[in-house]
Amino acid sequence: MHALTYIGPGQIEVSDVTDVEPAPGEVQVEVAFTGICGTDLHIFHGDMDARVTTPAIIGHEMSGRVAAIGSDVTGWSVGDRVTVMPLDWCGSCPACLAGHSHVCHKLKFIGIDAPGSLQRLWNVPARTLVRLPESLSLQHAALVEPTAVAVHDVRRAGLLAGERALVVGGGPVGFLIAIVAHAVGAEVLVVEPNALRRSLAESVGLRTIDPHAADVVATVSHWTDGAGAEVAFEVSGAGAGVTTAVDALGVRGRLLQVAIHGQPREVNLHRFFWRELTLLGARLYEPEDFERAIELLNDGVVPADTLVSAVEPLSNGAEAFRVLGAGTAMKVLVDCQA
């Protein structure tokens, strides 16, 4: 069986792996498509070698069909169309006992801490499966996981219809946050220096601004008649993005921190004091976020065809990493059966 394997920094290759029957409590999925995300790129560049054991099969944004069922599994049949919420929680830590298993103290992320979906057949815990409707194509369904991230972020921010939301960073997750925020009924402004990303956002009716060409805070002030944005989503992962997000918020505005920052950032706490701002963290997603993401994709609210720049066969999967790393694509999928 073929899989796409991370060997070391900058090294991805197709390898033959043994097809193992699903263990008790597991389901084997025939993977249709897997999306490459920013975390996968970080792994590819060697930034997560302290966490990832090589050789590693990575990937977690996927769709597919049930191929085999392990013992002790009920409710699933061969051929069922599924995606996977790739979280393996302990169930006994304080976070799990409080009902927050997505931030389990011992959380294992499948596709990072355990083998991922860049393979033709993938064994996963049955409890991670999420059913897909027949009306949603498997190619579009590979976007459920990143859309669930955006749904969780918008829900965590408590964004309301009529509020003004600033999205700092217009990559795939920022794009999806903007789409979900717009679906809630908010007014949205996307801050993004990359011309391709701005063009894609504008093509689906989103308003954008190039931070290299205009003063973002002044633009937001004009946009909101001097009030400032009610919510800012920091998705850039840059120190300047944090500063922009904070400075653009109005009184009692909410900053939703989405991007993972590899180092501490300076934050203007006087601004938080002066305007009574709120800082919220958002990590991963919960089951209801997956269900809502499926609805948004199935209803065509998420413009999947606009977001997907290319589809590469598994046999040429390394090209997906090269294309995405070059910054010339928004989302690249791997056809795991080709």
Image: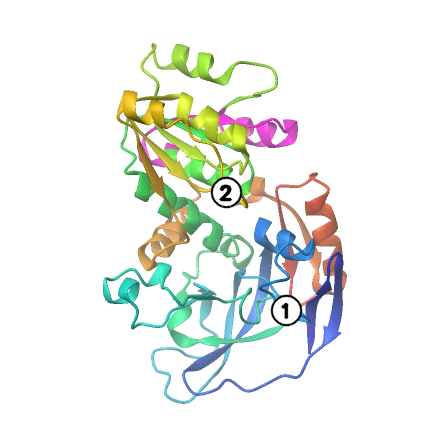
Q: Quadrant of residue 99?
A: bottom left
Q: Is residue 206 visible?
A: no
Q: Circle 1 sits on which residue?
A: 57
Q: Circle 2 sits on which residue?
A: 173
| Viewer-proximal residue among 206 and 240 | 240
Q: Position of residue 263 (x, y in %)?
A: 53, 43
Q: Position of residue 207 (x, y in %)?
A: 48, 23
- Determine which of the numbered discs, if any, sits on residue 152 in the image: none
Is 236 situated left or right of 126 in this image?
right
* Badge 2 or badge 1: first in the primary sequence: 1
At x 31% / y 43%, what residue is drawn? 155
What's drawn in magenta, residue-wise? 182-207
Magenta stretch containing residue 281, yes or no?
no
Residue type at mark 2: give it: Val
Quadrant in which the N terminus is drawn = bottom right
At x 57% / y 64%, what residue is drawn? 51
Residue type at mark 1: give it: Ile
At x 31% / y 14%, what residue is drawn? 227
Q: Is residue 10 above or below residue 252?
A: below
Q: Secondary structure at mark 1?
A: strand
| Viewer-proximal residue among 96 and 116 | 96
Pointer 2 local density, CA inside 10 Å: few below 14, some 14–19, many at least 20? many
Quadrant in which the C terminus is drawn = bottom right
| Disc 2 from disc 1: Cα separation | 23 Å
